[in-house]
Amino acid sequence: MHSKEDICANVPATRKINAYYLISGLGWERAEKNAFLSGDLPFRRKLKSQSGSFPLAGIWTGRAPREHGFFSLFHFDRENSPFGIFRYLKFLFGAGLHPKCIMNRKFSRELAAKAFASARGFSRSFRIYNMPYDRLPLFDCRPKRDILEQDSALPFKNISDILRESGIPHIIYELDESGGGGIDGLIKSIDKNPDFIFVRENAFYSFARRNVGSDESLSNGLKICERRICRLMEALKSTGRPFDLTVISDRGMTQKQYSANLKKILSSLPLKFGRDYVSFSDFSMLRLWYLNENARDTVHKRLSMPDCRGRFVGDVEKKALGIDFPRRSEFGEDIFAMNPGVAIEPSDMGKEAPSQIYGFSTDSPDSFAALLSTRQPPPEIKEICGIFDMMRKDIEESAPQHA
């Protein structure tokens, strides 16, 4: 069970419990279409999400990607790469270089990632996904620690840091039914009288990725979530203390409709990876670094063709999305974003994209996140990073009584 607790007993019955329940991948459109907990959580708002692989960082820090620095897992950094050891795999009879090698099977890659993470002190959730082993030494990665951990966003404070300073009893809980950190464990911990609860659940996201994406299957997945949350509400009521429960999401998902094999397209160019250019792709975007100007011109010309099903993200849009990083090259000299519903397949994250994917755009109808609550949220909260201020205020209002 992945849970963090700082609990004290004998809490006055009049003190309020503020509980937040994050459902990764629950979009506003999906929540409203299914009237998700509409009777229990009547105050509902559509929120704009953040681009990139880690929108949770926006919730946990209240900042844009340009500040908190969580955007995509790998970035080009040959000099500081921690993955140098992987360059020696080629001497083990070419281990890992052939696509059908046992080292490239899913379980082998997960074992390799876990062993590497343990040796380097990385987060237990670290994965190398579908990244070619021989390319890893060209990259560094972020995050190396879990976003919810203390000091994960220095020099900025995250919610874990604020909770530590406040001294209030709290729970930060990773709900994972398959790994033992299920709803029963969460409910049991409430008996210890926390003032603040944050739950992160990835079950709906995992369910949506495994299923074909039909409305019926996704509705069934949400019904399972509803039952868990209703059990949580009953447990909160049983404490005899006043409480508010707010269900939030990081962003919505969209149905995969088309795919584009950008790896094949790039490999067909008269360019060599690592000599002329470097790239990293997830399912919704391709990030590029150029090692000579000829490569830039060649790549731009080819990817601008209609069969690539995407577009280069301009400077104005980067600024609006909060991804105009101080060091322009850190997360890519160029970002090629796929059109809504189009997946890069295969990508460095997987050979095949799931049926439900996260898109690059934060303005498409399926991308908006949801805030569903027992109370009226502050009117200024229009984006997911505003949830940070809502949580911080709850913590600050609890802290003086606890001094």
Image: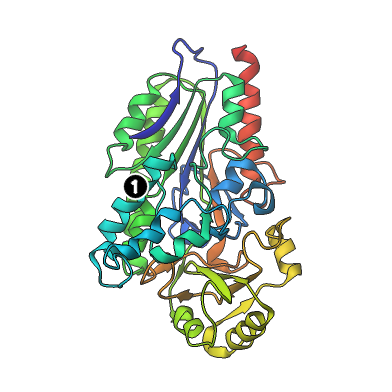
Nearer to us in this view, 113 or 70 = 113
Report helix, strand or loop for mark 1: helix
Residue depicted at x 58% and y 77%:
276
Which residue lies most toward the front here?
A: 91
Residue depicted at x 48% and y 87%:
268
Q: Is residue 172 above or below residue 286?
A: above
Residue depicted at x 61% and y 22%:
165
Q: Quadrant of the N terminus?
A: top left
Q: Is residue 44 above or below residue 352?
A: above
Residue 236, quarter of the rendered image: top left
Residue 395 point in image, percent of width and height: 61, 27
Left or right of residue 162: residue 30: left
Residue depicted at x 37% and y 25%:
189
How many C-alpha atoms fall within 10 Å of the one at disc 1: few (<14), some, or many (≥20)? Answer: some
Residue bearing mark 1? 114
Q: Is residue 81 above or below residue 195?
A: below
Q: Quadrant of the C terminus?
A: top right
Nearer to us in this view, 66 or 339 = 66
Does residue 345 appear in this view? Answer: yes
Badge 1 amino acid: Lys
Does residue 229 appear in this view? Answer: no
Residue 79 point in image, percent of width and height: 58, 55
